[in-house]
Amino acid sequence: MSLQVIFQIVLLFFVLVTIHEWGHYYFAKRAGILVREFAIGFGPKLFSFKRGETRYTLRLLPVGGFVRMAGEDPEIVHIQPGQTIALRLSDDQVTHIYLDQLDQRSDVVIGTVEKIDLEHELKVRLEAGGEAETFSIHPQAMMVTKGKETQIAPWNRQFGSKTVGQRALSIFAGPFMNFILAFVLFVTVMFLAGVPTNVKIEKVEPNSPASQAGIQAGDIIKTVNGTEIQTSTSKLTDLIGGSQDKKMDWTVIRGGKETPIQVTPAKNAEGRIMVGIGLTSDKRGTGVGEALSGGWENMKLATTQILLGFKMLVMGQFSMDDLGGPVRMVEVTSEHASAGLPQYTFWAAVLSLYLGIFNLLPIPALDGSRLVFLGFEAVRGRPVDPNRESLVHFIGFAALMLLMIAVTYNDIIRLVRGES
């Protein structure tokens, strides 16, 4: 595998995951939700930096990503009455709340908490030196413990404070961005590949029915049994497949002249009915209208095939070898990357579409499941118990990870055995 192919594989997965998570991030920010982390990958951090309120991280396992919004996880350490803390103030507002190493802090107020509200009132009442004083807390104040700073999240910055519509949009935006990217890539493929103007013979297998009939590379197929072929290779293969051991009347254009040829398809060693030719086509540039309509048609066709695959999965019409994990994905992506830019772009479009559709399935831990819970909330008029919802998503995530391990193991065994 060349360095270029490796780069194309890494670039593809990075773009697909980033555009998905950016959809979540952008609409969460527009709704006023505090986004704590924008992560590509799972597991230990490889690289991270903070810009504004959000930390951007690259993690070890390249199996997805996540946007961590305030209020989704109980990641903030709670401060209890009676606890000793230190406050740093600026312009009469608390900007930092220190929970440890208090004797090492300078220019701070140290005292015992009598009352604190970090979500609604944004105030803390502290008893220090026998006197109690109330301090206002800045809405972007930092809690500091064990050398780690965590920005507080007032209620109006938390995920749960937003309307059902705002939350649903921030969740749906991830898959939606994958759909947008898929369409753009399908349209790009139309520009890269061009529009076929005919069906032409690229090669003729030696000692094949086509060779015996006198068909030559470079021949343009005009009609078969009186049927205009135009640019439809599928029409040609259907006619061949239904004509085993039957003479077919072909008209080809050779050197600008129409030439009649009779060819008799035969079954090969694999049981396929063939004449022994490879096909290509002459192409012209693609117009904008053609690219848009062709890209849309390809997207609809790919969507149908993906949904059919999910249907077979649900009905149990599959074997373990039909599933693929990261290893199989890298293997297939390498093949498409090596086949040229149009094929690589087409595969990227299919993967982006697949990622969008898969994430909308009502499987716990996926975006589709979260949308289902929001639907329940909209109907009931109140949210589902957050602890129960978190448990469902945790179980779903664990199940997906176990499945990922299983299919990855199967991929490795298949590679060791030399199976394709």
Image (tube, rainbow, N blue to C red):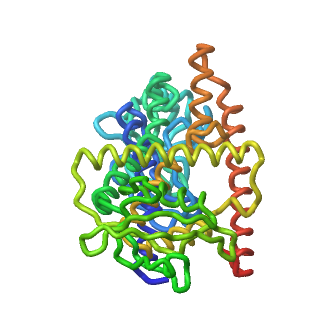
Specify whether 400 is left or right of 123: right
Query: What residue is drawn where x is 42% and y is 34%?
Result: 33
Q: Is residue 317 above or below residue 379?
A: below
Instruction: From the viewer's side, name the closer residue of 197 and 220.
Output: 220
Q: Is residue 323 above or below residue 173?
A: below
Specify whether 223 is left or right of 117: left
Report how many numbered discs are placed on residues in the image.
0
Residue 295 in view (yes/no): yes
Tell me residue 342's x, y (percent).
36, 65
Q: Is residue 139 above or below residue 309?
A: above
Specify whether 409 is left or right of 61: right
Residue 87 in view (yes/no): no
Tell me residue 246's x, y (percent).
60, 64
Query: What residue is drawn where x is 46% and y is 24%?
Result: 165
Instruction: From the viewer's side, name the closer residue of 124 and 415.
Output: 415
Examine the image and state in which quarter residue 387 appears.
top right
Task: Give the residue at the far bottom of this rendering.
Answer: 206
Tell me residue 121's x, y (percent).
45, 23
Tell me residue 101's x, y (percent).
53, 55
Q: Quadrant of the C terminus?
A: bottom right
Query: What residue is drawn where x is 35% and y is 73%?
Result: 219
Instruction: From the viewer's side, name the closer residue of 26 and 86.
Output: 26
Query: What residue is drawn where x is 43% and y is 54%?
Result: 226
